[in-house]
Structures are given as structure tokens and as C-alpha cells.
Amino acid sequence: MATTYIVDKDGNQIDASSATVPSDRHFRGAWSLSGSVISEDMTAAKAIFKDKIREVRAPLLEAEDVVYMKALEAGDSDAQAASVTAKNALRNAPAASAITNAADIAALKAAWDTAVLGDSPYA
């Protein structure tokens, strides 16, 4: 029978059958091995979380560019201002204080701003 290994963020590996593994695998790239216990490195998890925000916001920013251009063509200054506000919120999403202040994975997952980014991939 083949042995299955789990590799942490630093390249350390352990036999999966002897490891205590977190039940949430969203932040697997942030796993850190200490003996036979795997935990999440919050600094690495926050980086993964911010990368996910950047991935999700890219098409949202592109769509908002179209909204802005249509408002510009129509001379609708209210729609232009609303679009600028929406784009700023998207740009600022990775710097949210809720991400910085998250002390554990549950708090980090709760930091997803559905009003700006839409449905959370961590729900």
C-alpha cells in the first residue's frame, strides 16, 4: 500500500495517517507542520486570502470600467462618481482591516466583503 504524504508550506512532509490535519483545506498552502500537528500559518493564510480577492476583483474591475465609460459617454456625473467609488472599494479590498486583524481562519474567512466582492468562496 502506498503512503500518502502531506507537505506543508515549507516543504516539510509527514505521513498523512499520522498527522492531525485541519478540517478546512481552503488555506492548505498556509499549513505549517509541528511534529505531527498541522496548523495554519496566519501570515501565509492572509496572503492566500488577498490573492483570492485579487483574482475575484479583476473581472469586477473590468466590468466597472465599462460602466464608467458608458457614464462618461452619457455625461452622467452621478454614475461616474458611483463607478469611481465602486472601483476604489475593489482596489482597497485586500487592505481591509478585518483581514489584518484576523486572529484565526474563521475570522479571516468572515473578512470577505460580500458587498464589494460578491459571494464568498469560503462559505
Image: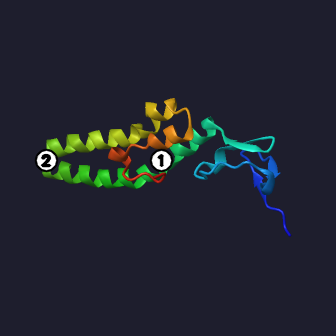
Residue under circle 1?
54
58 displayed left or right of 37 = left
Residue 48 lies, in percent from the top left, at 57, 45
Residue for point 51% across, 42% down: 50
Q: Which colour scheme is used?
A: rainbow
For residue 62, above or below residue 49: below
Residue for point 44% across, 52% down: 56
Q: Crowding at label 2, few (<14), some or many (≥20) Cα neighbours within 10 Å?
A: few
Q: Quadrant of residue 80?
A: top left
8 displayed left or right of 106 = right
The quadrant of the image that shows the N terminus is: bottom right
Residue 35 lies, in percent from the top left, at 81, 41
Residue for point 49% across, 35% down: 99
Residue for point 60% across, 48% down: 27
User: What kind of residue is marked 2?
Assistant: Gly
User: What kind of residue is marked 1?
Assistant: Arg
Residue under circle 2?
75
Q: Which of 116 and 98 is in front in this view?
A: 98
Q: Nearer the viewer, residue 73 or 90?
A: 90
Residue 112 lies, in percent from the top left, at 43, 44
Which residue is the extreme one toward the bottom?
1
- Nearer-N-terminus badge (2/1): 1
For residue 41, above or below residue 118: above
Which type of secondary structure does the marked residue at label 1 adopt?
Answer: helix
Nearer to us: label 2 or label 1: 1
Which type of secondary structure does the marked residue at label 2 adopt?
Answer: loop
